[in-house]
Image (spheres, rainbow, N blue to C red):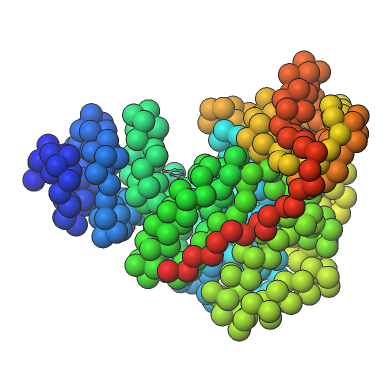
Amino acid sequence: MRMCDLILAKKEGRELTTEEINFMIKGYSEGAIPDYQMSAMAMAICFRGMNKRETLDLTLAMRDSGDVLDLSEIEGMKVDKHSTGGVGDKVSLILAPLIASLGVPVAKMSGRGLGHTGGTIDKLESFDGFSTEIEETKFIESVNSIKIAIAGQTANLAPADKKLYALRDVTATVDEMSLIAGSIMSKKLASGADAIVLDVKTGNGAFMQKEEDALALAKAMVDIGNRAGKRTTAMITDMDEPLGNAIGNALEVKEAMEALQGNGPKDLMEVVFALGKEMLLLAGRAENEKIAEELLRESIAQGKAFQKFEEFILNQGGKKEQVKNAQLLPKACHVIPVAAKEAGYIKRIFAQEIGLACMTLGGGRETKEDQIDPAVGVVLEKKTGDIVKKGEILAYIHSNDKEKTEIVYERIQRAYEIVEEKIQKAPMVKHIIRE
Ligand code: URA
């Protein structure tokens, strides 16, 4: 078999066989196929696409290029949750302990943030001493004893995808649906869960800005998951404005802690309950949506969800004082209000602008090597649909640097679109895809 022939076949629109796809991914990850041939193939795929069978084969070949986690020693149905990333997305921080508090095992691999969206691990590291570098045996032991552990992705999780994604990033071949779906699902399938719930964000702050693209990606991923034998559901949720009020690592942890104690913002809790219900259904922990929602609400109201959060943070090295008192989490030196330039109703808050403002303050990474400042970020006082007077506070900037504060002040003001007519906020969940 010659890679050149496969590139030609795809260029002409021919379907690649399972053997050809396995040859290509194995050869590329082992270094036998060079970057220039793989980039030509990625470009051919961008123009010709791949059908469902080819996409599944690509995903499985990338999954099998490294470690596939064996979670069979963990009792019960393991349901994983994945978000395509958004601004202020702290859903995993809430959902993981909430689901675990109901006896459903949560064995989660999470990533760090890059660009304007944050990562769960960065957020959790706001706790002094907290570590996600845990050995596989301790990871499994933790889930068996306290029902929850969150680990950083091992270097050897779908390494072929890592290599291919880096190549796509510099050859303008990221934005092809089967390549994206295969890339995300190869890592999810290697993480070993029995079922998967996907939160596919759409809107200004999302990877998939257009709803139809988010829908196509969701369908492609659900198809891969189900064909690979893992029951998979995807929800398309809104990311036109940041999720919740807090954006920035420690600020989001604080908001998540409040949410676990029953004081979460409405939009955030809408997403948490929607995804949580689906996880309980897939885990067989609830017979229907109504029961699932009751279980979730009860756990929060009875303090069980927050108790599980505390147990989880302490188990992975976090400090009790910071869990008991969120005021002890990293805090910025300056908290500066941003005033509205005009009166009216908030039509939208451009999530991407707020995410970039947070990054400028030091709360996100431009490159993988950047250090992040856990204390900084933005807290929104006004959200879509709210009424605002001229001069009223829209948001607070939490900053450790006066110069950076000045840079982001106007950016945040501009992120708010204020109009005269009343605005009705649309539901957070736009679609649910189960097959
Ligand atoms: N995220 C991924 O993990 N892979 C892609 O291809 C795009 C986004």
Residue at (37%, 61%) from the top-left corner?
224
Q: Residue furthest top?
A: 403
The image quarter containing residue 125 is top right
Residue 257 % position (x, y): 79, 54
Counting from the top left corner in percent of width and height, residue 278 is at 59, 70
Residue lying farthest bottom? 287
Q: Quadrant of the N terminus?
A: top left
Residue ID at (20%, 36%): 33
| Quadrant of ligand 1 in image | top left
How many callouts does the rendering have? 0
> Left or right: where does residue 225 sit relative to residue 405?
left
- Residue under the point 76% across and 66% down: 305
Q: Is residue 219 above or below residue 37?
A: below
Q: Where's residue 331, x and y in %?
A: 83, 35
Comparing 134 with 100, the one in front is: 100
Q: Position of residue 388 (x, y in %)?
A: 87, 39
Residue 61 seen anywhere in this rendered image of the structure: no
The residue lying toward the viewer, choosing from 46 and 279, is 46
* Foreground residue among 369 and 271: 271
Using residue 218 as the reference point, say whether residue 130 is left or right of it: right
Residue toward you, 38 or 130: 38
Quarter occupied by the C terminus: bottom left
Quarter of the figure with residue 2: top left
Which residue is pictured at 20% across the width and 45% down the height?
A: 24
Res. 348 visible in picture: yes
